[in-house]
Image (spheres, rainbow, N blue to C red):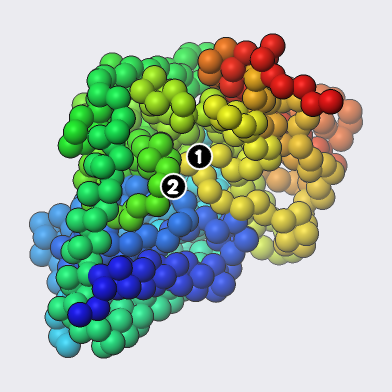
Amino acid sequence: MTSWEIIYKATVFIAEEMGVALKKSAFSPNIRERMDHSCAVLNERGEIIAQAEHIPAHLGSLKVGVSNAMNYIKENKVELKEGDMLLFNDPYISGTHINDVTVLAPVYYKGEIVGYVINKAHQVDVGGPSPGSINPYGKTLYEEGLVIPPVKILKENKINKEIIDIIRENFKSPEIGLGDLNAQIAANRMGIRRINQLIEKYGFKEVEKGWKRAIEYGRELTLREIREWRRGEYEAEDYLEWKEELINIRIKLKITDEKVIADFTGTHEQIEGPLNSVLGVTFSAVSYPIRCAIGKEIPTNDGFYSSIELIAPEGILVNPRKPAAVGGGNVETTQRISDVTFLALSKALPEKIPAAGSGTMMNVMMGGSYKGKYWTYYETIGGGTGARPNKDGVSGVHVNMTNTLNTPIEIAERQYPLIFTRYTIREGSGGEGKYRGGDGIIRAFKVTHLTSISVLGERFKIPPWGLSGGRPGKTAKVTIIRNDGRIEEMPGKFSTILYPGDEIIIETPGGGGFGKVENRFIKE
C-alpha cells in the first residue's frame, strides 16, 4: 500500500508545476514576472485537494468559486467532455474580481471524470472604460469590463473561435490577453497529464484514498491547533476610505472546538463604488489570517477550509448583490478584511499576531497608444509588514493578501513608455515601538507618451495600527509633478491623464509597531 502522504505531496507538486507552466508561457509581465496567478487540483466532487503557494486572495476564493461553478454546471446541465475547458470571470461565480480569468477542466481517466484542475490568472485588461479594468469610479460590473459566464473555451481539445473573437474585440490588448489565456490552457493540460501519470503509477483507488485522507488530515490538524486557542468571541473594526466617508468592516470572531466563525453583521452596506467584496474573496481574506495564526505546516485543502464559517448578510460590503462593482474589493477590501481578522485574533492570541501591515495593494493601472498599438500595464506596489511580538516588521514587500513579486524596472521600461526615476525603501515609514514596523516603498516614474492612469489605494487617511502600545505606520501618499513644475497631491482613488515628462511618485505605508517604544532594545 502506498503512503497517502506520497500521493498528496505529488498532487501538491502537480499544482506547483501547473503554476510554473503558466508563469513560463504567459505574455504579460503581470503573470510572467509578478506571478499574479494560482492553481489547484480538485477531486471529482470539486473539493480542493491541493493548491500551489501562490496568491492568498485567489487561493481561499477557490473554495467558494469552485462550489459556484459546480452549481452552475449542474443547474445549466453543462456536460464537460474529455478535452473540454470552461472559461469564466464573473466575480459572483469565480469569487474574486473581473480581471481574474478562471479556467476549469475535468480530468478523465479511462472514460470517467476523476477530478478537475483549475487556475486563475489576473489578466491585465478585460475591457471596460479604464486601463487595467479596475475602475476607481465604477458603480457596477458593467463599468469594469467584459463579464464572461462559464463558457467552453475548449470543446474536445478544439478552441472555441467564437469566444476568442469576443475576447479579441473587448480586451484592450488582445494579443497579451490571448497569450495569457493560452498559458492558462497549457497549465491545465499539464495538470491533467500529471494526474493521469499519478494514477497510472499508483492506481486510481490508491490516489482516491490518498486524496480523501489528505482532506481528513487537513481538518484534523487544523482543529488540533484551533483547540489550543482561547475560546470566546473577539470583536474588531477597521475602516476603508471612500470619497469623504469612512466605511466600516466589523467582525465578531467566535472560536469553538469545531470551527472558527467569522460574523460580519454590522458591516457597512454595499456601496456604489468598486470596494464591494464578493463572498469568495471575503472567505479568502478570513481564511488567510487563520492559516497564518496556525503557523504549523498543514494541508491547505478542503479539510482546512471546512473549519471556517462565514456569516455575512447579503447586501453588505463583504457580500454584495450583483451587479455591484467589485474590482477594488479583491485588491483593497480584502486587505482590510485581513487586517480586521488579524485584529480580532490578536485578542485571542496576543503572543502570535503582528501589528497591521501596509494595508493596501496600491494598484496602478495605465494605458495608451505606443508604437502603433494600445498598451495596458498593471502593477501593485508593496509596503511594510507590521512588527511582530518578537521581531521588527519587514520592509518593501507585498503584504498579506497579495503574494506577488514586483515588476522589474528593466522589463517595464523595455515594454512600455515609462522611465523610472526612483525605487527605494521609504525610510522611517514603519511605526515605532519595542519592535518597529517595516518600511514602505517609494516608486516613481515619468511617462514619455500620453498616458491614462488610474490609482486605487488605501491607508491615505487611517494609518496601519500598532499593537500593545506600538505606534501606527505612516499613511500613503501619491504626488504628480507636471512637466511645467506644478505639484498635485492626489487622493487614494483617481483617474487622470499624464503628459510626456509628467512624473508620478507613489509612497506606500509602513507597518505598525509592536510594544511601547521605550522598551525597545538599543544595541551598543
Label 1 with label 2: CB-CB less than 8 Å: yes
105 left or right, relative to 256: right
Label located before the other in sequence (1 or 2) = 2
Indicate the quadrant containing the C terminus: top left, top right, bottom left or bottom right. top right
Query: On screen, 447 above or below 79?
Result: above
**Residue plotted at (11% across, 60% down):** 74
Give residue 332's position: percent from left, percent from top.
49, 34
**Residue plotted at (52% across, 44% down):** 402
Q: Amino acid at mark 1?
A: Asn
| Residue 181 seen in the figure | no
Crowd around label 1: few <14 · some 14–19 · many ≥20 (10 Å): many
Q: CA distance from mark 1 to mark 2?
A: 7 Å
Query: On screen, 263 above or below 147?
Result: above
* Residue denoted by label 1: 400
Query: On screen, 372 above or below 322?
Result: below
SS of the residue under disc 1: loop
Indicate the quadrant containing the N terminus: top left, top right, bottom left or bottom right. bottom left
**Residue plotted at (58% across, 68% down):** 27
Query: On screen, 227 above or below 467?
Result: below
* Picture quadrant where residue 451 is located: top right
* Residue denoted by label 2: 56
Give residue 49's position: percent from left, percent from top.
27, 62
Q: Amino acid at mark 2?
A: Pro
Total number of numbered discs in the rendering: 2
